[in-house]
Image (tube, coloured by chain):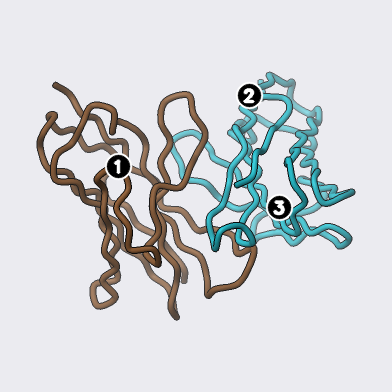
Chain colours: A cyan, B brown
Amino acid sequence: SAVISQKPSRDICQRGTSLTIQCQVDSQVTMMFWYRQQPGQSLTLIATANQGSEATYESGFVIDKFPISRPNLTFSTLTVSNMSPEDSSIYLCSVGGGFSGYEQFFGPGTRLTVL
Amino acid sequence: AQRVTQPEKLLSVFKGAPVELKCNYSYSGSPELFWYVQYSRQRLQLLLRHISRESIKGFTADLNKGETSFHLKKPFAQEEDSAMYYCALSGPRQAGTALIFGKGTTLSVSS
């Protein structure tokens, strides 16, 4: 299994500002995923972050809005840029697929509120 | 298009009653199907996966390819089963495949 921590756990931000969310894993992993869970909605994949290469973004998500860093095999950051109230969500990172078959392990999430 | 549908947003049952959480999927190929659960104030975690054909906490789920369904069942619900349940799928067997989630069903079990 993998233990994942995220910082911050929650934040309240002003419109137009940016927030960087950190994700730390207790073991080395090749792929990390960033998801968004908007209020009352399901989890939606934002991007896949591979160490040593550019992140791969899903349709509807762009690098300018959600830049991702992946400096090593245990750490990644997601930045939510130029925030608006529509960005208020829970952001989760996860790892998996290489562990115990196809189980994914999730971080506790970062609850973001944009005023 | 790849899609997971959970038609019920909320399912309320009494303790001891049978439970069935519905999940239908759309995928061209042979997906892997999962049920994830999120208890209050806890992180999302795997409940079970179809390839294991296992029973976890009394829950089972059978993949029906003809009906493209993966319904979650438990014969006798317990209060501690109250949680949010997500059905999810991933692509063919390869490491690091992201999940496609349904919208989730809140299960509420009362005494």
Neighbor class of circle 2 (other Cα within 10 Å; few <14, some 14-19, many 20+) is some
On the same chain, marks 2 and 3? The answer is yes
Q: Residue, x 39% and y 63% (percent of image)? A: B52
Neighbor class of circle 1 (other Cα within 10 Å; few <14, some 14-19, many 20+) is few
Q: Quadrant of residue B23?
A: bottom left
Residue A6 lies, in percent from the top left, at 70, 32
Q: Amino acid at mark 3?
A: Met
Q: Secondary structure at mark 3?
A: strand
Q: Please say if the residues under marks 2 and 3 sit with CB atoms less than 8 Å apart.
A: no
Q: Please say if the residues under marks 3 and 1 sit with CB atoms less than 8 Å apart.
A: no
Query: Going by the image, does B101 lie left or right of B64?
Result: right
Callout 3: chain: A
The residue where tag 1 is placed is B57
In the rendered view, would you say B47 is above or below B109?
below
In the rendered view, would you say A64 is above or below A50?
above
Q: Secondary structure at mark 2?
A: strand
* Sooner in the amino-acid sequence: mark 2 or mark 3: 3
* Nearer the observer, A95 or A112: A95
Q: Residue A113 — which label?
A: 2
In the rendered view, would you say A98 is above or below B102?
below
Q: Residue, x 69% and y 55% (percent of image)? A: A47
